[in-house]
Image (cartoon, coloured by chain):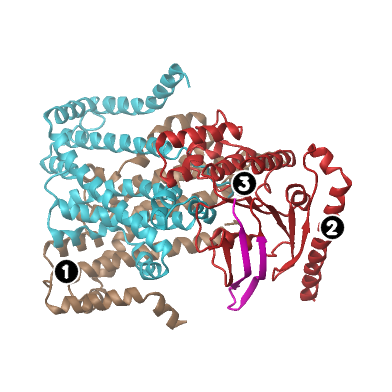
Chain colours: A cyan, B red, C brown
């Protein structure tokens, strides 16, 4: 796509949002919607600017990101190892399979009060819930990915001199990467959702707590500003993840059929 | 260049129902140094099983395989394998695929690069080094697979219907390519194929297997004058005679399969 | 058959036994890990008193109603986006944002606008689920083989009926997939909203138990949620298999 075409596409994509925001401003200024319920977009924008510049946003955002990404990293590491173990060793699979099936329909956010009892209102509690929430998608997807690695790839690698020890990093891991990535793509938004849930319920810091705090104090322009900024961060990180995935997996050929 | 000795080889697989089926039984054969031998037979006769055991992928139930008097217990870089499905590593470029065996050998980076470049040129893959397998045609994938196996100089080449998925023209080109490489590099080749023509065209000896449990039915010597053009070889009377000889043996086994299937359907 | 079930889930039995032993051993404080037997008794008691059932129904009601609203709105939106390029242009970025953002961020805003009763939760559930419904319906509508539509038109089917008779049935598998994504979300949102802002329901029950360190009640509520989640999932699968009999899965 030419640079000009890309510019046009970007503007075209942003236009509906711009329309929505303009409507917001108009409607609140005109008094159709009370500013008690919804502050004007301009006042929210000013508050947002203040949050960014003063570093308040940065401080809380960092805490939330630390919890979300920390928990996610743990679920990926543990999940991949467990998924691999389940896919390659029968007794590991038979041990964990009922556990996985049992816990699958449980919304992991239900564990927030439990971790609150166990670890209080701390980062560790938050990371624990995030870890548990992201674990199952990673495990299940890794399991399927490893199971699907074609036998001839393993055989070829062994003929080419790969020792049993190195098979995992040299062949199994890259071959199952598309599936593992799928699990990560599912676990990432889950970790954000869980962090927000934790911070709305049991936290003294973090974005969720910030939003809740302003809401409780009735400082609605700052509340909406914090919501707005977090939405922006979540959206940008989602897009970034999609791009990252495309780059990582540019060699992947979708199996035809279905 | 190495000698493959197979003694009393047998393989039994357990079936889902609980009993067992003999895939191959009591195979004894020797492939000499630098010899090109093909294996043909009806479907399910155990050709691929035989090859997989020589490659070291699956253990035999009975018997042994010796490569230059050393028993085979596991896969290794002394035996290169080429599959019908190419088995290229999709996450590696053409150049990286070819480099794989060399990396496992522990060669220095420049050395690896040098050998890879040489094979890229030799196999007509110039310009495609940075492409991923998904971007290649079947013929090119097969060439990459062959290059990958040849690059680290195994003594033995084990090929399981390598040209089975190619169209007719590419297949012929690849066959001549393979013959050229075999003469140049002096490898011992064990070649499994469905095509009797291909077996006779390429090999010095053709092994015909019986239907399951696979045994050696016959071994036919092929001494065609291959110094000629392909067309002359393929249209010569000796070729036709040998081809028929092999085909009749194979057909007999195929008919046994048909009859068995008909009988069990009654 | 029963024996096979036992063998298959031996790890669960093992863990349950370990839980009971560790909890009763005095190694961990009671509030940290109450024995399974105590939890079971509490669960049965709360169930018998009607407390669990009442709160569960509240949460289920909110989640389900929000889900239904999201399905209707989402399907309409998805169909609209598939039919009209203008609608697609306008809503595409909005859907993209909606999908990629944790809607629970809006809990304080929804409390401000709608209070802490049923409405706020139902509406947030609807807002959370509508995007996945819209996207899957859109994909489903777009997947309809042009030739099917063409044949139908040639045979004289009026435009309105086309939608009903061809597009929607063809999009059904996709719509159901969207539902399978949205249903768990509905439960999560309803439930976290109750935890964060109160107003009854299993979420509120659970967080209250936590605040007062009444662990058996906490676990009982947790187990109730697990059951509800399980029931939702099974029910949807059942409906899917009935409705999509014709589909080659």
Image mark 3: chain: C
Give the Cα separation between the discs numbered 3 and 1: 53 Å
Residue sitting nearer the eye, B18 or C68? B18
Q: Secondary structure at mark 3?
A: helix
Residue range corresponding to the magenta coloring: B1-30
Secondary structure character of the magenta stretch overall? strand
The location of residue C205, given as percent across then percent down, is 20, 63
* Residue C166 badge: 3
Residue B218 part of the magenta-drawn span:
no
Pick whichever of labels 3 and 1 is earlier in the sequence.
Answer: 3
Give the Cα separation between the discs numbered 2 and 1: 83 Å
Q: Secondary structure at mark 1?
A: helix
Closest to the camera, between mark 3 and mark 1, is 1
The location of residue B24, given as percent across then percent down, is 66, 69
Residue B5 part of the magenta-drawn span:
yes
Q: Is residue C188 visible?
A: no
* Residue C215 badge: 1
- In the rendered structure, the answer to whether residue A119 lies left or right of residue C173 reads left
How packed is label 1: few (under 14 Cα within 10 Å), some, or many (20 or more)? many
The location of residue B43, given as percent across then percent down, is 72, 61
Q: On the image, numbered disc 2 is attached to which residue? A: B245
């Amino acid at each position: 796509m030419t640079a000009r075409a890309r510019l046009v596409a970007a503007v075209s994509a942003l236009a509906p949002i711009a329309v929505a925001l303009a409507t917001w401003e108009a409607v609140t200024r005109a008094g159709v919607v009370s500013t008690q319920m919804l502050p004007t977009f301009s006042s929210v924008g000013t508050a947002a600017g203040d949050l960014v510049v003063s570093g308040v946003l940065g401080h809380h955002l960092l805490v939330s990101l630390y919890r979300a990404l920390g928990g996610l990293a743990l679920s990926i590491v543990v999940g991949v190892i467990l998924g691999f173990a389940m896919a390659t060793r029968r007794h590991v699979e038979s041990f964990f399979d009922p556990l996985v099936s049992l816990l699958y329909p449980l919304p992991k956010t239900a564990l927030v009060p439990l971790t609150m009892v166990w670890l209080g209102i701390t980062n560790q509690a938050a990371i624990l819930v995030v870890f548990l929430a992201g674990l199952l998608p990673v495990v299940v997807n890794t399991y399927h990915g490893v199971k699907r690695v074609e036998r001839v790839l393993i055989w070829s690698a062994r003929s080419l001199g790969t020792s049993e020890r190195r098979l995992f990093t040299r062949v199994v891991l890259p071959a199952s990467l598309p599936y593992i990535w799928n699990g990560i793509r599912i676990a990432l938004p889950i970790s954000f959702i869980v962090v927000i849930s934790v911070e709305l319920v049991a936290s003294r810091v973090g974005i969720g707590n910030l939003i809740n705090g302003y809401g409780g104090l009735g400082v609605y322009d700052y509340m909406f500003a914090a919501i707005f900024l977090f939405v922006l961060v979540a959206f940008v990180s989602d897009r970034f993840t999609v791009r990252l995935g495309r780059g990582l997996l540019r060699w992947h050929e979708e199996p035809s059929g279905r | 260049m190495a000698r493959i000795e197979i003694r009393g080889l047998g393989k039994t697989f357990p079936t889902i129902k609980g009993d067992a089926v003999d895939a191959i039984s009591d195979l004894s054969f020797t492939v000499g140094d630098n010899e090109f031998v093909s294996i043909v037979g009806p479907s399910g006769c155990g050709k691929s099983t035989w090859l997989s055991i020589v490659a070291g992928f699956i253990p035999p139930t009975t018997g042994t395989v010796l490569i230059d008097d050393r028993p085979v217990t596991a896969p290794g870089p002394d035996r290169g394998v080429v599959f019908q499905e190419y088995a290229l590593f999709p996450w590696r470029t053409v150049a990286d695929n070819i480099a794989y065996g060399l990396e496992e050998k522990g060669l220095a980076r420049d050395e690896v690069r040098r050998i890879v470049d040489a094979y890229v040129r030799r196999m007509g893959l110039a310009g495609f080094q940075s492409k991923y397998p998904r971007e290649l045609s079947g013929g090119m994938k097969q060439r990459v697979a062959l290059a990958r196996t040849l690059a680290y100089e195994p003594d033995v080449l084990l090929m399981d219907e390598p040209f089975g998925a190619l169209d007719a023209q590419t297949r012929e080109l690849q066959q001549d390519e393979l013959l050229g490489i075999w003469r140049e590099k002096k490898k011992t080749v064990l070649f499994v194929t469905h095509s009797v023509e291909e077996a006779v065209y390429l090999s010095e000896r053709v092994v015909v297997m019986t239907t399951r449990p696979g045994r050696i039915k016959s071994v036919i010597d092929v001494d065609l004058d291959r110094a000629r053009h392909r067309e002359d070889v393929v249209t010569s009377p000796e070729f036709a005679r040998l081809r028929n000889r092999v085909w009749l043996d194979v057909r007999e086994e195929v008919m046994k399969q048909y009859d068995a299937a008909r009988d069990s359907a009654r | 058959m029963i024996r096979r079930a036992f063998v298959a889930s031996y790890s669960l039995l093992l863990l349950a036994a370990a839980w009971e032993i560790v909890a009763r051993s005095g190694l961990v404080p009671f509030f940290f890990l109450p024995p399974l037997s105590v939890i079971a008794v509490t669960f049965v008691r709360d169930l018998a008193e009607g407390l669990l059932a009442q709160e569960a129904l509240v949460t289920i009601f909110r989640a389900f109603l929000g889900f239904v609203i999201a399905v209707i709105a989402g399907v309409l939106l998805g169909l609209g986006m598939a039919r009209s390029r203008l609608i697609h242009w306008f809503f595409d970025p909005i859907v993209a944002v909606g999908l990629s953002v944790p809607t629970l961020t809006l809990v304080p805003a929804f409390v401000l606008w709608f209070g802490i009763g049923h409405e706020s939760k139902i509406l947030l559930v609807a807002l959370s689920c509508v995007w996945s419904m819209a996207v899957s319906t859109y994909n489903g509508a777009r997947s309809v083989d042009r030739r099917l539509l063409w044949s139908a038109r040639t045979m004289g089917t009026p435009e309105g009926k086309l939608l009903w008779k061809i597009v929607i049935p063809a999009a059904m598998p996709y719509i159901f997939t969207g539902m399978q994504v949205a249903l768990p979300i509905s439960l999560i949102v309803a439930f976290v909203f109750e935890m964060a802002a109160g107003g009854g329901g299993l979420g509120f029950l659970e967080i209250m138990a936590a605040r007062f360190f009444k662990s058996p009640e906490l676990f009982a509520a947790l187990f109730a949620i697990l059951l509800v989640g399980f029931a939702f999932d099974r029910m949807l699968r059942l409906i899917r298999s009935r409705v999509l009999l014709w589909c080659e899965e």
